[in-house]
Amino acid sequence: MGIQGILAGLLVGGPAHGYQLKATLEEELGPVWMTSASQVYLTLGRMHRDGVVSSRRVRQERRPDRQLLALTASGRALALEWLFESDDPDESVVRLAVARLVVPDRFAELTDIIVEQRSAALTELRSLRRDATQGFQREAIDAEIQRVQADLRWTVAVREHAGAIVQRPRSGSRSDSSARYG
Amino acid sequence: MGDDDRLVVALAGVTRVFQTPGGPVTALKPVTLTVMRGEAVALMGPSGSGKTTLLNIVAGLDRPTAGSVTVLGTSLATATERQLTAFRGLRLGIVFQEAHLLPGLTALQNVVIARLPWGDRRTLEPRARDLLARVGLADRGNFLPARLSEGERQRVGLARALLGDPQLLLADEPTGNLDSATTEDLLGLLEELRRERTLTMVIATHDAAVAAAAGRQLRLNDGGLEATTRRGFGGSVRMRILD
Ligand SMILES: Nc1ncnc2c1ncn2[C@@H]1O[C@H](COP(=O)(O)OP(=O)(O)OP(=O)(O)O)[C@@H](O)[C@H]1O
Ligand SMILES: [Mg+2]
């Protein structure tokens, strides 16, 4: 689901402007996670077209109007589905980052879900490994197993510190409406 | 018997308090637990949470301060030491956190020796060789423990535990010193044994990746068993598409 799930997820925390969503992602996830502004706006436009978000025009002095975006009922369902039921290993980090902000009371539950998902994937890979005897098959599966193990161990470590992670204040600028980010 | 046949481990209200010079240490709060035949259960929890204490009690190596322990239909609380020794020798396989090999005996002899009271060397040795091969030590049979790595000694300990064809395998961090591929090989072997012989196992580990190999995960925290809920979330494997 990618960027759409992430944006919808952030909006579970309340209506926001596009630039705020982008700033939140940058500030929360830091330098190894990159989002392009054009990608964010393009996706928000598509979400609006699809009825996932509604928008309200906000007047600004001496500046163009801004769109304040809010989730529709179906958008909210989509966001919660992305958070709690999707299963793309590459998105665990962002799902948890978003959950920390918008549903902190369910953060630990989400770590449990991801642990369970990665454990199930590991079980699946191990059963594939049993029959993989030819050529380079076993090594190829071992490579996947090690990736899943790393994901799993990381998630367990996060779960162990879930309480402190949720307490940590959110970074900067959600309420900062100065117009530095266009 | 009947249904009880399927019940391999039944703990009810088991506690263990150690008396120490500094006062009593509660290693296990009341623990209630059942394990069915053919089940693989992972016992997780941080260091000091009581995993080894619990395994020792199930193995009849230690007695609970209170509560009842029934393993393979035998009530361990009322058994004599002699009965416990025979029980362990004939029906359990135990893999300790440290292998405890006899330093003067070769790997092969170490695998065989614990079974000698109940079997003869000529039939035990070929099976021991086979098990050493299955744990990846085919060419280490004649090595003395001092010449084996820690992970190799641990695997000798596993072969020793499996030699008597136990009904219940209790393993304490059996993959603690193994590299990743060897760990996978061992977990694969255990899964094979579970299927072939309906072997029941309880494996203590603090590694979630090892615990994932078990059908059920239990978590100890400060001597208390936490309920784990499995909600049946699937987990997709990343398929690599060549295009
Ligand atoms: N013989 C003993 N005398 C006193 N205290 C003990 C004894 N054995 C264990 N304990 C205490 O009981 C608690 C549980 O120990 P246990 O060895 O069962 O933990 P564990 O979960 O196996 O830890 P690890 O992961 O480090 O192996 C610890 O606080 C330990 O200090
Ligand atoms: Mg221990």
Image (tube, helix red, strand yellow):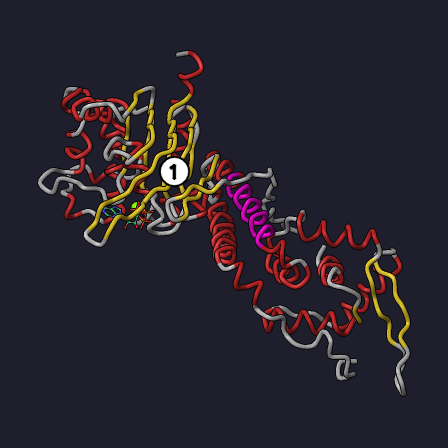
Circle 1 packing at 10 Å, graded few (<14), some (14-19), many (20+), is some
Q: Residue B17: percent from the left, percent from the top? A: 28, 42
Q: Quickly name the residue at label 1.
A: B30
Q: SS for tag 1?
A: strand
Seen at 87% across and 56% down, the residue is A51
Extent of the magenta region: A108-123
Residue A74 lies in the magenta-colored region: no
Quadrant of the rendered image containing residue B136: top left
Quadrant of the rendered image containing residue A24: bottom right
Seen at 44% across and 15% down, the residue is B3
Q: From this viewpoint, which residue is outermost toward the top?
A: B2
Closest to the observer, B184 or B167: B167
Query: Residue flagged by tag 1: what amino acid is it?
Result: Pro
What chain does mark 1 sit on?
B
Quadrant of the snapshot with the N terminus of chain A: bottom right
Residue A113 lies in the magenta-colored region: yes
Seen at 17% across and 19% down, the residue is B119
